[in-house]
Image (cartoon, rainbow, N blue to C red):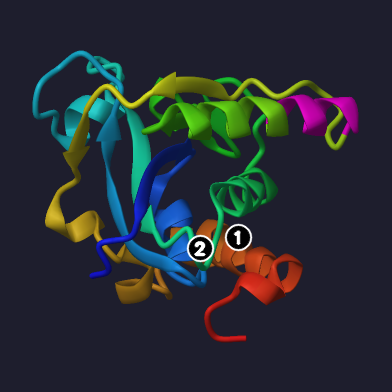
Amino acid sequence: MSANYETITLAGGCFWCLEAVFDEVKGVLSVESGYANGHLANPTYRQVCEGDSGHAEVVRIKFDPGIISARDILNIFFGIHDPTTLNRQGADVGSQYRSGVYYHTPEQKDIAEALIADLNARKIWDNPIVTEVEPVKDFYIAEDYHQEYFARNQYQPYCMAVVAPKVNKFRKDYRELWRKA
């Protein structure tokens, strides 16, 4: 892996969706599904799903800023999920499904806040963005079976109904950033 990379951690509903999309983005070096910004050390998937750990389902993205910028990463992020619903993405409900940008640098914080202000000003959505912008406080990698979940389970009903449409939206709307285009 290149020594020249940045890391950003994002929450936008189920981590399977985000991982599947960002696996296809030019300049992304790795994507790991996990849990962040909760209060329980080493949470399990069950603890996160029960809502007691305070964690969000997240992806930790390592990317080459010489190929893709943090702003482009965030543009994709805001384009593939609904950042206006508090603790919810579609049928997935709970604080673990909240929308969040967990920045690793002050510059990422500034970019996220400016982008949110711009998107709100342009009224892209009917409601204001509720995405939290906070420093990443912790990151715990999810269990092995969550890693590359969509790649290994494309025909699972949830993947076909929820994940695949987000991947297809990315491929259509961000073609220039698609690794395979």
Q: Nearer the viewer, residue 59 or 136?
A: 136
Q: Nearer the viewer, residue 148 or 137?
A: 137
Q: Is residue 99 visible?
A: no
Task: Give the secondary structure at mark 1.
Answer: helix
Q: Which mark is residue 57?
A: none
Q: Amino acid at mark 1?
A: Lys
| Quadrant including the N terminus | bottom left
| Quadrant including the C terminus | bottom right
Task: Classify residue 153 by image quadrant.
Answer: bottom left
Which residue is at a point 56% across and 54% down the rendered structure image? 69
Vertical comparison of 98 with 10: above or below? above
- Cβ–Cβ below 8 Å for labels 2 and 1? yes
> Where are the magenta residues, as a range?
116-123
Q: Amino acid at mark 2?
A: Val
Task: Classify residue 172 by image quadrant.
Answer: bottom right
- Distance from disc 2 to disc 1, alpha carbons, whole Å, reads 7 Å
Q: Position of residue 80 (x, y in %)?
A: 64, 51
Which residue is at a point 58% across and 25% down the rendered structure image? 131
Instruction: From the image, tell me which residue sits under label 2.
Output: 21
Vertical comparison of 47 with 174: above or below? above
Task: Give the secondary structure at mark 2.
Answer: helix
